Amino acid sequence: MARVLDGTLDAYSLHDLTTLTAPEAAKAQYTGELARYRSPREWWRVATLPDGEPVGFVIPAHNGYNPIIAYIAVLPEHRGKGYVDDILAEGTRVLVDQGVPRIRASTDLGNVPMAEAFGRAGYDAFEREIVMSWG
């Protein structure tokens, strides 16, 4: 998780990186959010090339309200090669196999590549959220 923070477009991660190192930010996100999901860890996927080299990962989950794509990431050296589409498809497949009626996912306005990947995968943009904080 720390490696994917290099060059991230995620606003929360960028904010975290103003005061934390990448390993600290990854640990905080894992313990503060991802580890709390009660959905099975068996749903989580690491994408690899045929030789076993990691490309990225996806965390399909259930947040207590909806099935979600909780986290999806591609390692910096593999970005821009279209791997995100396969990674997202696998995360979506895991949730579809659970028979869920819908899957929610979100991304930041500034993360255009991720928004485009959701669009290519057939996800509909159905609402917008503005998160504001005091500096």
Image (cartoon, helix red, strand yellow):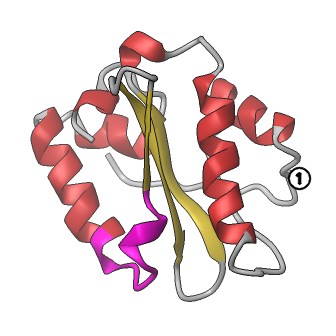
Residue at coordinates 45% horizontally, 23% vertically from top-left? Answer: 50
- Whether residue 33 is visible, yes or no, is no
Along the line of sight, which residue is nearer the eye, 12 or 92?
92
> Residue 32: percent from the left, percent from the top?
26, 69
- Residue under label 1: 124
> Residue 97: percent from the left, percent from the top?
71, 72
Task: Find numbered disc 1 in the image and state the secondary structure of the residue it sits on.
Answer: loop
> Residue 124: percent from the left, percent from the top?
88, 52
Viewed as shown, does residue 50 lie left or right of 62? left
When asked about the image quadrant of residue 38, the answer is: bottom left
Viewed as shown, does residue 66 lie left or right of 58? right
Q: Residue 42, relative to residue 22: is it above or below? A: below
Q: Residue 105, relative to residue 22: is it above or below? A: below
Along the line of sight, which residue is nearer the eye, 27 or 61?
61
When asked about the image quadrant of residue 120, the answer is: top right
Residue at coordinates 37% horizontally, 71% vertically from top-left? Answer: 41
Q: Which residues are magenta?
A: 35-44
Amino acid tagged 1: Asp
Residue 39 is one of the magenta-drawn residues: yes
- Whether residue 126 is visible, yes or no, is yes
Name the image quarter holding the N terminus: top left
Viewed as shown, does residue 5 lie left or right of 124? left
Along the line of sight, which residue is nearer the eye, 109 or 87?
87
Along the line of sight, which residue is nearer the eye, 76 or 127?
76
Viewed as shown, does residue 127 lie left or right of 55? right
Residue at coordinates 19% horizontally, 57% vertically from top-left? Answer: 28
Residue at coordinates 87% horizontally, 59% vertically from top-left? Answer: 126
